[in-house]
Image (spheres, rainbow, N blue to C red):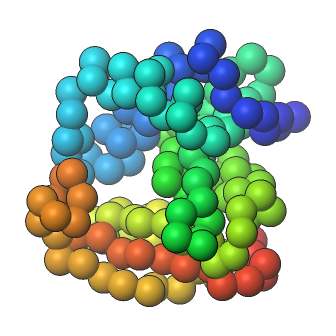
Amino acid sequence: MLNIRPATGRDAAAVADVLLSSRKTLMPAIPLAHDNESIRKWVALHLIPCGHVLVAERGARVLGFCALAERGGCGWVDQLYVRPEAVDSGIGSALLGYAVCELPFPVRLWCFRDNPRACQFYERRGFEVLLKREGGAADNEEGLPDILYQLSDRRLED
């Protein structure tokens, strides 16, 4: 059974593991902007303490997480990652569904254009392209082309 709950400081290592393994395995063409140790520190000292982070777990194993925020009158999914071996098992859909229920509308998120699997995932669930950027240091830390997606109402498709 999948359990979705708020992350705690004890989850920092598992959340960082999910982020790093997902990025390296599922998005090898998208380089990380920071080294592993910096990412682990950021998760432990910033992401979990300062954000609304949810983990999806089976048993005691964290299989995915998402970070939610409210900015500029919109709900934001700032991070959504699933362990590579757990992709296509409904975890991403469960986390996104939870996020959509928790956040005000519209719900927005950024996705790298070089991550077509994720782009298709969001588009199949009703997210629409709001903006495409060409990349560069001003756009994101990686300097890569990305897409701003928006879900305007509670119509989340599966």
Q: Residue at x 75, y 75 (%)?
A: 156
- The extreme right residue here reads 1
**Quarter of the image where one finds residue 3:** top right
**Quarter of the image where one finds residue 38:** top left
- Can residue 60 be spotted in the picture? yes
Image height check: is 58 above or below 147?
above
Image height check: is 68 above or below 17?
below
Name the residue nearer the viewer: 147 or 52. Answer: 52
Q: Is residue 19 left or right of residue 94?
A: left
Q: Residue at x 59, y 45 (%)?
A: 66
Name the residue nearer the viewer: 116 or 35. Answer: 35
- The extreme left residue here reads 136
Q: Quadrant of the N terminus?
A: top right
Q: Quadrant of the C terminus?
A: bottom right
Q: Residue at x 77, y 58 (%)?
A: 102
Name the residue nearer the viewer: 103 or 61. Answer: 103
Give the percent coordinates (x, y) of residue 51: 57, 39
Give the percent coordinates (x, y) of residue 65: 60, 40
Q: Count the marks: how many?
A: 0
Give the percent coordinates (x, y) of residue 122: 56, 71
Give the percent coordinates (x, y) of residue 157: 74, 77
